Image (tube, rainbow, N blue to C red):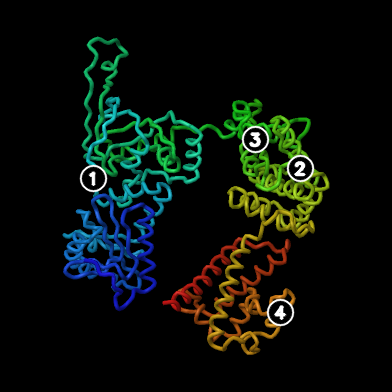
Amino acid sequence: MVNTEEPTQGKKKSAIKFEEKIKSFLQSLEFNDVDGAKDSLRIGYPKEHQIDVIAGWENTVFVFECKSAREFNTTKNLKKDLYEFRGKIPEIEEGLKRHPLYKNYNNYRYILVVNEKVVLRPADKEYANTKPGIYLWNEDFLEYYTNLYSYLKPYAKYDLLGEMGIRPLDQEPMRIPAFKVKFGDVNMYTFVINPKDLLEVAYVARREKAKERYYQRIIDKERLNKIAKYIEADGKFPNNIIIAFKDGANVKFRGKEPYTTYNNTSWPFLGIEFGILEFPKDYRSCWIIDGQHRLYAFVNTNKWFNMPVTAFENLSIEAQGRFFLDINKNQKPVDSDLLWDLNGDMIPSEKEGIISNVVKGLNNENSSSLFHKVYIPSSGIKKKKESIKLSAICIAVKKRRLIEKSTNGKNLNPLFEDDLQKRINNISGSLSDYFFYLKNLLPGLWELGPKGLIITNGGISVMIGLYQKILERSISKNGKKPTEDDFRLYLSPLKEIFNKEYNNENKLKNLRLRCTSEGGKSELLVELILKIKILSGDPHFGGDVEDPHSNEFKELEQKLRELINSILLKKFGENWMEDDNRVPKDICQRCSKYLKEHNLEGKKKPYTQLTLGPCFSIIRKNEELFRPIFVNDETGFASNVEFDAAINQITRIRNTQASHSIEVPVKIADEARLKLNLDQINQCINDFLEKKNE
């Protein structure tokens, strides 16, 4: 029976929010008949019970009892909650059998979910397993399958179903033509299969048994996307995916009769049989030892083709681990410099080939300052320690889209030509001019070679990023490639920057270390662009590049403005900004003046113009109202002194960066402390608003 009447007492927002999370999770995995996260869902007979969330798959219905942190009993002992849930199961089951939608399901699963990282005690699990059994889900479970969903999309559902002991409704086994051969003490099969079929039965590692996932690599989402694009472009894989059937799997092989006559290369002599391989079409019936990226990439394409597979029967988990390690240790990857070098020779008209030949052009004796400074395998010259990797420059040129019609998707690139050789000459020539100017502008830094910055793998990437910004600015000004005047205008500030900020061996060493990661290179490029904006007098240089913390500061300003208005409006009325006892007079005057000058009077409230400094001044002036929000025993600061130090540091860095100072760079320790301070202040505000809305 179903009762759609609202109960007398509605659920708390936090409980509904948690139920909505479970409901959304199930919908993402494409379960059927998902419902819940509302007061009106009540099922049971003869007595109705509130159902938090419900879903179905094939012949199984899943009933969820959700316990948010605020509903959870204080002892964090699940026994009481399990006992109460178990007591309702007979009536819920009778109600499901009479329900117009869920009566079609004849298999039942009951799940208790807790929304905090509660440590599930062995006693809780043991009690949950007593009949009728209840499955326990916590944040770890949800996080694991949410992460798996990001790679596998709805196919993650099959892994989850397998963990819950659910078998497909269709029990017809999979039958595939295959070759069989003895591999030591185990059987090895080779066959081809549609990846779609394999995705339903194969998995990488069991979440619930750590020992079964020790050998697995982390799945790389970028790699999955690259392989998917390769498949979409009609790419094929000649190498096999390697899997192992799980222990106890009912694997059968029906071989064909051997030939009556054969020579020493025929199948029986080699111990090979051909026949039909049969194995259960169960979720998690086989483990992927190698090739998960090739298999999972099909999730992101609409193309399917048969993949070659090697499968092992009765292979222990230890043996699987050894196979995995052997494959990854002994399978030597092709050197990236050689690959880029070969691109130019073997696919000269494709993107990677064009990039390769552009960079090789920088090694021309007659035209480039980089002659013999780039390692090119086909040149026959041995790789030197101080050489820049060909791959480092190629990747930077590719990332900056220098060979494309447009480097930023807006304006036409003047270096682009349909004629490939002209395009290669244009780009190589302009980059050569750029590096020639850099060499003459910073001769001392250039001569330091790998002990400086420019002639390093990380440094060259940053400098090519800077070249792209100069190219884009030149295009936006006159539609032409950069001239010597452009290089002089935008590169001359580097001399002042390096002379003042990176003027000794130690500082250069730290700078090189920053450039060993993509994040560090990006940060340095942004810093250089921001400083060049000021020193060149061109605020449009670099486009929309902003200080890395600017968005964080803006978001905090917005939160603080709304917090201050909410509290002072309620306490002192609409004109609280005009109260000198609450707001310093100069702050109110500045805000009002801005509104008047921009014709916004009557359209916006003065408080909307408050920035970080004034916000903190108002908080200090009204400390009896605001201190409890930020200084407390829960998520707040431990003392007034700590809170004052935090807002002083945030204000100092905000003011330093707002002035675009090149004299006072933010130190690494400052960065770490700033992040902690911003996180803690944001958390204090969020906690206050959450309590207020309950």
Q: Earlier in the sequence, mark 2 or mark 1?
A: 1
Q: Which residue is mark 2?
A: 434
The residue lying at 50 percent from left, 74 percent from top is 684
Quarter occupied by residue 588:
bottom right
Cα distance, mark 3 to mark 1? 53 Å
Can the viewer see residue 633 in this picture? no
Q: Residues within 10 Å of mark 3 (few under 14, many from 20)?
A: many
Determine the secondary structure under disc 3.
helix
Determine the secondary structure under disc 1.
loop
Q: Is residue 299 left or right of residue 262?
A: right
Determine the secondary structure under disc 2.
helix
Q: Which residue is mark 4?
A: 590
Q: Residues within 10 Å of mark 2 (few under 14, many from 20)?
A: many
Q: Earlier in the sequence, mark 4 or mark 3?
A: 3
- The reply to whether discs 4 and 3 touch (Cβ–Cβ < 8 Å) is no
Q: Earlier in the sequence, mark 4 or mark 1?
A: 1
Instruction: Choose mark 4 or mark 2, whichever is in front.
Output: 4
Q: Earlier in the sequence, mark 3 or mark 1?
A: 1
Q: For the C terminus, give its image quadrant.
A: bottom left
Q: Residues within 10 Å of mark 4 (few under 14, many from 20)?
A: some
The residue lying at 31 percent from left, 51 percent from top is 160
The residue lying at 37 percent from left, 64 percent from top is 20
Q: For the N terminus, give its image quadrant.
A: bottom left
- The reply to whether discs 4 and 2 touch (Cβ–Cβ < 8 Å) is no
Q: Earlier in the sequence, mark 2 or mark 3?
A: 3
Q: Which residue is mark 1?
A: 169
Determine the secondary structure under disc 4.
helix
